[in-house]
Image (cartoon, rainbow, N blue to C red):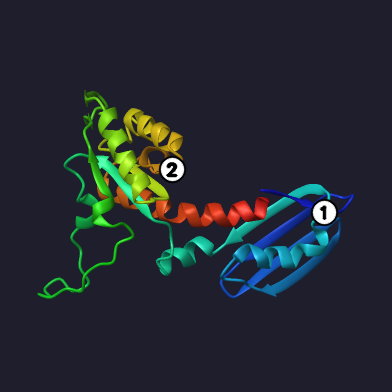
Amino acid sequence: MGMKVRNKNNLRIGVDSGGTFTDVVILDGKRLEVRKVPSTPHDPSMAVYEALLDRLDGQNHLIIHGTTVGTNALLENKGGKIALITTRGFEDVFFIGRQTRKELYQLEAEPRKYLLSPNLCFGLTERILAGGRVETALDENELEKIIKVLKQEQVQAVAVCFLHSYINPEHESLAAQKLTRAGLMVTTSSGLMPEYREFERTSTTVINAFLMPVMAGYLGKLED
């Protein structure tokens, strides 16, 4: 990611944005400078700006950036409002999981906390077989109805995970195009993790969707 920085020479800047401190290393020719400032959890980009304030002017230079913004949002359950669109009949895959429990024989198990509300999980008519052949075409009219609900619910990002899309992403790509045109952030399982096993693929895609609004806001402010 590039950022405008004032210097005739090419700068190399490393940024580590953490929950407590934001560390910056600036390589200016043969001169190495290290800076540390308190992080700003309410707006993590502010700490990065503060650390580089006297360098932000004029030219583009290389910035290597690492951050725990996404990790913290996931651990604190502070991501975006998301929805899941999956093959009709497989709406519960994400919630059933692998049926693993902390205490297998406990009769009153502690309820799990999910990143996704069950009422925002939608089954869509479509079907691709294990070999990649399309058995049932994606119902575009049905998808348009789902999009209307997503807009009404003010959903920020959508995870799309269809059965066997790892071998044929056609339906996921079509759904993503329509969702993107509707102004929604979209992540597809075939684009993110094109591997078999529905739960692992679905849960990975849901987590990515959950973090997209947070990371888009953070990186967008840095780019501005």
Q: Look at the numbered disc 2 and give the secondary structure of its residue.
A: loop
Q: Is residue 201 visible?
A: no
Q: Quadrant of residue 117?
A: bottom left
In three-dimensional space, the C-alpha distance between marks 2 and 1, rounded to whole angstroms, equals: 33 Å
Left/right of residue 10 with respect to residue 42 in the rendered view: right
| 30 vs 87: above or below | below
Left/right of residue 164 with respect to residue 204 in the rendered view: left
Query: Which numbered marker is on residue 184?
Result: 2
Q: Residue placed at 58% from the left, 69% from the top?
A: 18
Mark 2 Cα shell of 10 Å, populated few (<14), some (14-19), many (≥20):
many
Residue type pointed to by label 2: Leu
Query: Which numbered marker is on residue 89?
Result: none
Question: Hey, which residue is sitting farthest right in the picture?
Answer: 8
Q: Residue placed at 57% from the left, 62% from the top?
A: 67
Left/right of residue 2 with respect to residue 141 in the rendered view: right
Residue 26 position within the rendered picture, expressed as x and y whole percent measured from the top left: 78, 61
Q: Quadrant of residue 188?
A: top left
Question: Hey, which residue is sitting farthest front in the picture?
Answer: 152
The foreground one among 24 and 43 is 43
Residue 3 position within the rendered picture, expressed as x and y whole percent measured from the top left: 73, 50
Q: Which residue is mark 1?
A: 57
Q: How many marks?
A: 2
Q: Residue placed at 40% from the left, 37% from the top?
A: 179
The answer to whether the residue labelled 2 contacts the one labelled 1, judged by CB atoms less than 8 Å apart, is no
| 24 vs 216: above or below | below
Q: Earlier in the sequence, mark 2 or mark 1?
A: 1
Mark 1 Cα shell of 10 Å, populated few (<14), some (14-19), many (≥20):
few
Left/right of residue 172 with respect to residue 52 in the rendered view: left
Residue 155 position within the rendered picture, expressed as x and y whole percent measured from the top left: 38, 50
Residue type pointed to by label 1: Asp
Residue 153 position within the rendered picture, expressed as x and y whole percent measured from the top left: 34, 51
